[in-house]
């Protein structure tokens, strides 16, 4: 009688242990703290960052393989930078117009 009572207690113990093991292994689910940083950018800062991004990727955005190199004569009047840019051939309809390159002075 004592062995059957012990066997039933062991069976109950291992059954409860088997049912409780996934929760113990999984652990208590914790919710991480959501930290949101409020960044307030002024319109001028946004425009400046977009301009910098556009200047950085300007060669990639140009039609054709590479932009031509501006010569000394084309950049003679520039104080700062001179860079080749795409300019529409027809100014009236720039979207459907073909492009050509022109050297433009930048500040």
Image: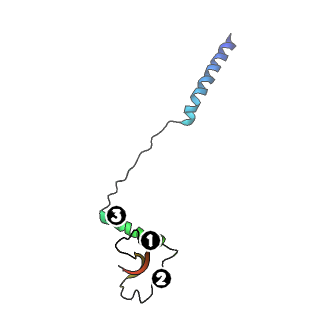
The residue located at (44%, 44%) in the rendering is 32
The image shows residue 103 at horizontal and vertical percentages of 41, 81
Give the number of the disc on residue 46: 3
Give the number of the disc on residue 56: 1
Mark 2 surroundings: few (<14), some (14-19) or many (≥20) residues within 10 A: few
Image vertical order of residue 96 relative to residue 33, above or below? below
**Could you tell me which secondary element the residue under label 2 belongs to?**
loop
What separation in Å lies between label 1 and label 3 (alpha carbons)?
15 Å
Q: Earlier in the sequence, mark 1 or mark 3?
A: 3
Q: On the image, numbered disc 2 is attached to which residue? A: 69
Q: Earlier in the sequence, mark 3 or mark 2?
A: 3
The residue closer to the viewer here, 44 or 63, is 63
The N terminus appears in which quarter of the rendering?
top right
**Could you tell me which secondary element the residue under label 3 belongs to?**
helix
The C terminus appears in which quarter of the rendering?
bottom left
Would you identify the image quadrant in which residue 100 lies? Answer: bottom left
The image shows residue 34 at horizontal and vertical percentages of 41, 46
State yes or no: discs 3 and 2 in contact (Cβ < 8 Å). Answer: no
Would you identify the image quadrant in which residue 17 lies? Answer: top right
The residue located at (48%, 80%) in the rendering is 68
- Looking at this view, name the residue that lies furthest to the top: 1
Mark 3 surroundings: few (<14), some (14-19) or many (≥20) residues within 10 A: few
What separation in Å lies between label 2 and label 1 (alpha carbons)?
16 Å
Image vertical order of residue 33 relative to residue 79, above or below? above
Relative side of 50 to 19, left or right = left
The residue located at (38%, 66%) in the rendering is 50
Q: Nearer the viewer, mark 2 or mark 1?
A: 2
What separation in Å lies between label 3 and label 2 (alpha carbons)?
30 Å
């Amino acid at each position: 009688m004592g062995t059957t009572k012990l066997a039933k207690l062991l069976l109950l113990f291992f059954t409860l242990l088997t049912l409780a093991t996934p929760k113990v292994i999984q652990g208590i689910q914790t919710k991480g703290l959501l930290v949101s940083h409020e960044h307030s950018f002024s319109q001028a800062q946004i425009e400046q960052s977009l301009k910098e991004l556009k200047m950085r990727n300007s060669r990639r955005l140009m039609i054709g393989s590479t932009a031509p190199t501006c010569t000394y004569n084309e950049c003679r009047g520039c104080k700062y930078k001179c860079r080749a840019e795409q300019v529409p051939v027809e100014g009236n309809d720039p979207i459907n117009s073909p492009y050509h390159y022109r050297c433009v002075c930048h500040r």
